[in-house]
C-alpha cells in the first residue's frame, strides 16, 4: 500500500536517464584475480568511466570481431 501523501509520479516522472538507447536489463558475472580487478579499476580511472562500462565495451568489441 502506498504511503498517503506520497508522490504518484516517483517511478515514472523522476527516473534517472543514463543516456543509453536501450536500458540494460541482463547481468553477467565474472570472477577475476585481484590483480586483474586492480588493473581494471586503474584503467577505468584513467578513461574516466566505470569498470562495468569498460567491461561492456570490451565484450562488445570481442563479440563484433568473432561474429
Image (cartoon, rainbow, N blue to C red):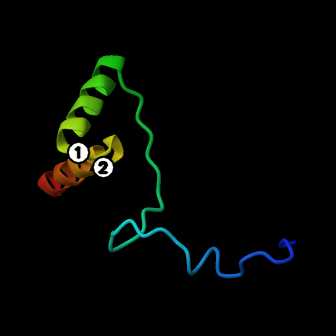
* Residue 59 position within the rendered picture, expressed as x and y whole percent measured from the top left: 25, 48
Q: Quadrant of residue 30?
A: top left
Closer to viewer: mark 2 or mark 1: 1
Q: In terms of depth relative to the viewer, which is nearer, 26 or 44? A: 44
Q: Secondary structure at mark 1?
A: loop
Horizontally, is 5 left or right of 38 in the view?
right
* Residue 3 position within the rendered picture, expressed as x and y whole percent measured from the top left: 84, 71
Q: Which mark is residue 63?
A: none
Asked if 29 appears above or below 22 in the picture, the reply is: above
Query: Decide: marks 2, 1 in contact (CB < 8 A)?
Result: no
Query: Image point 71% across, 77% down: which residue?
Result: 7
Horizontally, is 4 left or right of 33 in the view?
right
Asked if 44 appears above or below 34 in the picture, the reply is: below
Q: Secondary structure at mark 2?
A: helix
Q: In terms of depth relative to the viewer, which is nearer, 55 or 50? A: 50
Horizontally, is 67 left or right of 14 in the view?
left
Query: Image point 30% across, 49% down: which residue?
Result: 53
Q: In terms of depth relative to the viewer, which is nearer, 2 or 24? A: 2
In three-dimensional space, the C-alpha distance between marks 2 and 1, rounded to whole angstroms, equals 10 Å
Query: Image point 33% across, 69% down: which residue?
Result: 20
* Residue 21 position within the rendered picture, expressed as x and y whole percent measured from the top left: 32, 74
Q: In terms of depth relative to the viewer, which is nearer, 15 or 30? A: 15
Query: Image point 16% across, 57% down: which residue?
Result: 64
Q: Looking at the image, is mark 2 or mark 1 earlier in the sequence?
A: 1
Among all residues in the image, which is located at the extreme front? 5
Mark 2 surroundings: few (<14), some (14-19) or many (≥20) residues within 10 A: few
Would you name the residue on which mark 1 appears?
48
What is the count of numbered marks?
Answer: 2
Would you name the residue on which mark 2 appears?
53
Amino acid at each position: 500500500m502506498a504511503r498517503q501523501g506520497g508522490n504518484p509520479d516517483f517511478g515514472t516522472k523522476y527516473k534517472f536517464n543514463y543516456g543509453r538507447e536501450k536500458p540494460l536489463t541482463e547481468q553477467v558475472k565474472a570472477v577475476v584475480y585481484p590483480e586483474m580487478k586492480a588493473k581494471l579499476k586503474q584503467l577505468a580511472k584513467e578513461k574516466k568511466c566505470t569498470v562495468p562500462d569498460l567491461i561492456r565495451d570490451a565484450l562488445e568489441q570481442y563479440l563484433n570481431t568473432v561474429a
